């Protein structure tokens, strides 16, 4: 079995990316680093929007208990921090690069783009054993096993970290930053991911069995069986 996570990208953003790629391939002399940084930041925001912000907005509409508002507020703070980091550091990190330094990362991301049913996705692969483990836990939750909820959310963190590795850590190495910038970015990535993973793990311990499928189904919609 082969599994991958599909994250939708807006057509307009993708066209901007293609334009940058074509101009790089044509040897354009005008610096494109700023444009590429903005496009990568836009893609990051779109991914966070569909994976987390959409869920948070739905969660707010479903709140019935006072303590639920604190849970939503805590989640919102984490999402805002991560969004702010991406918007600030992605354009900053590559702003001074010449076009030749951008070519490897553009080629890398072009290989991660997938077209299906008229939609455009960034796709990353998930190990079969991890995907099958989370699928088993999701099925157990649907059968009424509350003990699997927290474990399922921990598995979600593993799936997300796989994406962080393929969409952030690996392409970062292609850019060959100097020591100062690389250290700064590593710190930003570590703080942001740790906050997000801690919040998601906490959510897995706060969610009740009756509402767990709602959260699980939201995240599982992105996991595709490619067999």
Image (cartoon, grey):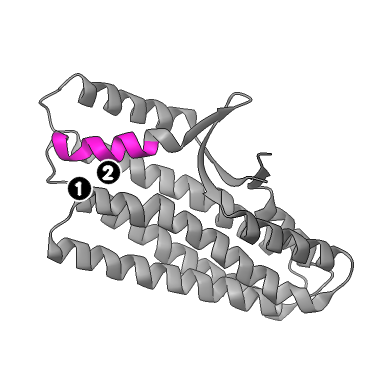
Q: Nearer the viewer, residue 219 or 62?
A: 219
Residue found at x 61% / y 72%:
154
Q: Secondary structure at mark 2?
A: helix
The answer to whether one can see residue 61 in this image is no
Q: With respect to residue 72, does 5 lie above or below?
A: above
Taking the image as shown, residue 183 lies to the left or right of residue 83, namely left
Looking at the picture, how far across and down is residue 185, in whole percent? 26, 63
The answer to whether one can see residue 188 in this image is yes
Residue indicated by mark 1? 94
Residue indicated by mark 2? 37
Task: Assess whether mark 1 and mark 2 are in contact (beta carbons under 8 angstroms).
Answer: yes
Taking the image as shown, residue 197 lies to the left or right of residue 70, namely left
Q: With respect to residue 212, does 176 lie above or below?
A: above
Looking at the picture, how far across and down is residue 89, in whole percent? 27, 56
Q: Which residues are magenta?
A: 100-109
In the picture as drawn, the residue positioned furthest to the top comes out as: 26
Q: Which labelled disc corresponds to residue 128?
A: none
């Amino acid at each position: 079995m082969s599994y991958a996570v599909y994250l939708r990208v807006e057509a307009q953003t993708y066209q901007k990316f293609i334009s940058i790629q074509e101009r790089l391939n044509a040897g354009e002399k005008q610096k494109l680093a700023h444009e590429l940084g903005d496009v990568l930041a836009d893609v990051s925001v779109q991914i966070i929007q569909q994976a987390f912000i959409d869920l948070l907005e739905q969660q707010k509409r479903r709140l019935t208990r006072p303590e639920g508002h604190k849970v939503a507020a805590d989640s919102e703070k984490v999402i805002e921090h991560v969004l702010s980091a991406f918007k600030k550091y992605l354009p900053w990190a590559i702003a001074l690069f010449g076009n030749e330094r951008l070519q490897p990362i553009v080629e890398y991301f072009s290989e991660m783009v997938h077209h299906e049913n008229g939609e455009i996705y960034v796709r990353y692969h998930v190990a079969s054993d991890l995907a099958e483990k989370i699928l088993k836990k999701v099925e157990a939750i649907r059968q009424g096993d509350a003990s699997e909820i927290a474990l399922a959310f921990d598995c979600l963190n593993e799936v997300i970290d796989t994406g962080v590795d393929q969409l952030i850590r690996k392409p970062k190495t292609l850019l060959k930053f100097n020591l100062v910038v690389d250290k700064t970015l590593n710190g930003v990535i570590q703080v942001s991911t740790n906050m997000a993973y801690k919040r998601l793990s906490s959510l897995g311990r706060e969610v009740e069995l009756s509402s767990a499928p709602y959260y699980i189904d939201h995240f599982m919609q992105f996991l595709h069986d490619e067999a």
